[in-house]
Amino acid sequence: MGRLDGRTALVTGASRGIGRAIALELAKEGAKVALNFASNAAKAQEVADEIAKLGSQAILAPANIGDPKEARAMVAKVAAEFKHLDILVNNAGITRDSLLPKMNDQQWMDVIQTNLGGCFFCTSAAIPIMTAQSYGRIVNISSMNGQVAAIGQANYSASKGGIIAFTRTAAAELVHSGITVNSVSPGYTETDMFDAVPPALQAKIKANIPMGRFAHPEEIAKAVIFLVADGDYITGQQINVNGGAFM
């Protein structure tokens, strides 16, 4: 028996990295999982196949969550297929790094629209579904770089800081609807996105982490599982999973 038997979940950006780890942990706890992805159907199918081996069910949910129509249609389709939607994890995010003097409008808009806009579009679509069933668990994946200065990431930091503020307000507004809203802020994590950081810079970053290593995606996922499985009296909160890099 899993802690999430009978529950359904939607994870955005679930084909790789932290999103993949979250989807697998949800499935291990018994949830049926919808896997959102923007373009890499093959990777998403690999995750679905892994979930099937765990004895749970997964469906693919392609959509560009930065597009409000696509995002909301995707949420509605998932809820219709599962007959209900209990858990939403807003994980999908992108980077378009550049120093401010060189950052162009498109780099700014792409990141804000996907990271922060996508969080709003999916959440706003899930609210009436969850309100009707008087139950919902929403977890928004922010970042340590939404809490501290991150040179070259003004757009990313603004989007992730916005997610933290959005989470608190959403929690306050939905507290009487049976819906909890929380956020998880990972530190530097071993993902494809972070692999693109030059090794010399990775070494410098690691030297400033008290625990002396980067996070594993599964460690971020476990914080999400705690909130959706055991966090019935937790809302509007933020869990930092960063090895002590920001306290």
Image (cartoon, rainbow, N blue to C red):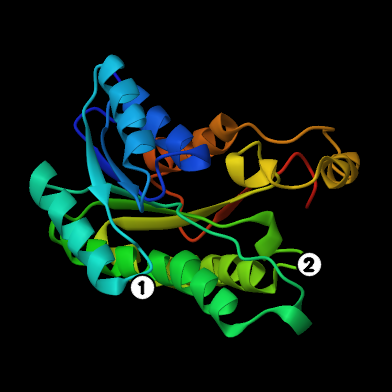
Q: Mark number for residue 173?
A: 1
Q: Earlier in the sequence, mark 1 or mark 2?
A: 2
In front: 208, or 46?
46
Say which residue appears at 47% left-offset and 38% top-offset.
16
Q: Amino acid at mark 2?
A: Ala
**Viewed as shown, does residue 208 lie left or right of 174?**
right
Q: Position of residue 48 (x, y in %)?
A: 29, 29
**Viewed as shown, does residue 121 lie left or right of 104?**
left
Judge whether 45 appears above or below 12 on screen: above
Residue pointed to by mark 2: 149
Q: Position of residue 8 (x, y in %)?
A: 23, 40
Distance between mark 1 and mark 2 Cα atoms: 29 Å
Q: Amino acid at mark 1?
A: Glu
Judge whether 53 appears above or below 85 on screen: above
In front: 233, or 186?
186
- Residue 66 visible at all: yes
In front: 139, or 3?
139
For the N terminus, give its image quadrant.
top left
- Residue 3 visible at all: no
Element marked by disc 1: helix
Judge whether 11 appears above or below 151 on screen: above
Tell me how many marks there are: 2
Say which residue appears at 56% left-offset and 70% top-offset.
159
Element marked by disc 2: loop
Q: Position of residue 178 (x, y in %)?
A: 27, 56
Q: Position of residue 129 (x, y in %)?
A: 17, 60
The nearer-to-camera label among 1 and 2 is: 2
Say which residue appears at 85% left-offset and 46% top-offset.
205
Q: Mark number for residue 117?
A: none
**Viewed as shown, does residue 239 lie left or right of 91?**
right
